[in-house]
Image: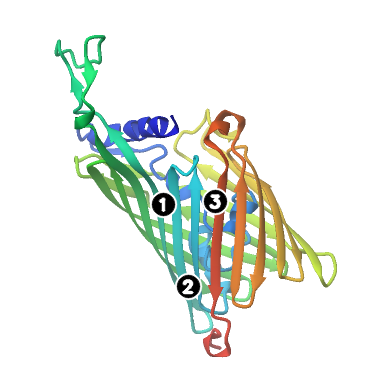
Amino acid sequence: MIRTILGGLAALALAPCIAPAQGFVNAKYAGEFLSSGVGGRSAGIGGAGTGFASDVTAGYFNPSALSLISYPQITILHESRFASQINYDYAAGALPLGPDQTVAISAIRLGLDGIKDSRNALVDRNGNGRLDEDDRIDESKIKLGGSADWAIYGSYARRIDDRLSVGGNLKILYKTVLEHSAWGLGVDLSATYRPLEDLQLGATLTDATKSLLTWDTGNQEFIVPALRMGAAYRYRINEDHSIMPAIDGTFRFEGRHEVTMVDLSFASLDVQAGLEYVYKDRIFLRGGYTDLKQITIGAGVKLPKLNIDYAFTRQSADLDAFGATHRISLMLTLEEPKFLRGE
């Protein structure tokens, strides 16, 4: 039943790309798969990350914050959604260059396989193009296909001074729905500011110049810019214990007035927030609330050179039949003197 529903959603997604070419269109939700976040840490804090990202995952949340890493890092993530019908995968690596610059590369894939394509399987006895009482579906003509969204990020960050860093992404997009595909290109711009040692502010303008998607059918779509802003503050209770509240706010300008947390008329605003508890910088407990009205919890452990993070998202009541979402990520830091960022 779940696969049938998801297959239907994929068919709806296919409709725009097989429609006759109509020039350039500002496409609502065309870049939605890019809003899923990365890393188990962020997922446990309600999906926030723009304000506190300071590792390789900053290439996604806020590329300017890549300037805060001191050693090369790589990370991988896997997440199963909707009773394992949809898979979400992510991998990234970051490399400091000299005292002030950092580069990174990231890859994201969101995929649904095993979609039943029955468009050519109708035995239409009266030729009206509809499934009537006397018609039937020839299962031998049903084909299996899939849908996948890909994004490859190339990131750059530069530290201006001890408080301010700037950065950006150049990203390549690739989408497939059954036999159709689309290519796209986009740019993100960002900045990080640390007015206090334990307070970090971040802002990212995603798809800053509008990201263009061109389908093999001739259809062309624009992904509209969005402004993501975040803040996080590390409150140190004592030498061993600390807590970090964090919040992200995303302003979108594509007309999501009915399905947003706050309708600002000229834009929509969605908020993600959460809290992280840290014990001796080794053990982490997390909780949060997403813009989809979901409660998240998570935990992490920091081992020598390796971080392991897990997050659990409970679906809202309307989607309870699809089950919960589990995310686990690993991050390796080459924390050795020979790899330390150069002075």
Label 3 sits on residue: 228
State the residue lying farthest toward the front: 140
Q: Is residue 197 visible?
A: yes
Give me the residue at 25% from left, 29% from top. 118
Marks 2 and 1, Cα distance to the nearest angstrom? 21 Å
Q: Is residue 180 left or right of residue 164?
A: left
Crowding near pointer 2: few (<14 within 10 Å), some, many (20+)? many
Residue 73, position as x, y percentages in the image = 51, 74
How many badges with numbers are in the image? 3
Tell me the quarter of the image containing the N terminus.
top left
Q: Is residue 314 left or right of residue 34?
A: right
Give me the residue at 72% from left, 57% from top. 285
Label 2 sits on residue: 94
Q: Amino acid at mark 1?
A: Asp
Marks 3 and 2, Cα distance to the nearest angstrom? 22 Å
Label 1 sits on residue: 207
Q: Is residue 90 above or below residue 46?
A: below
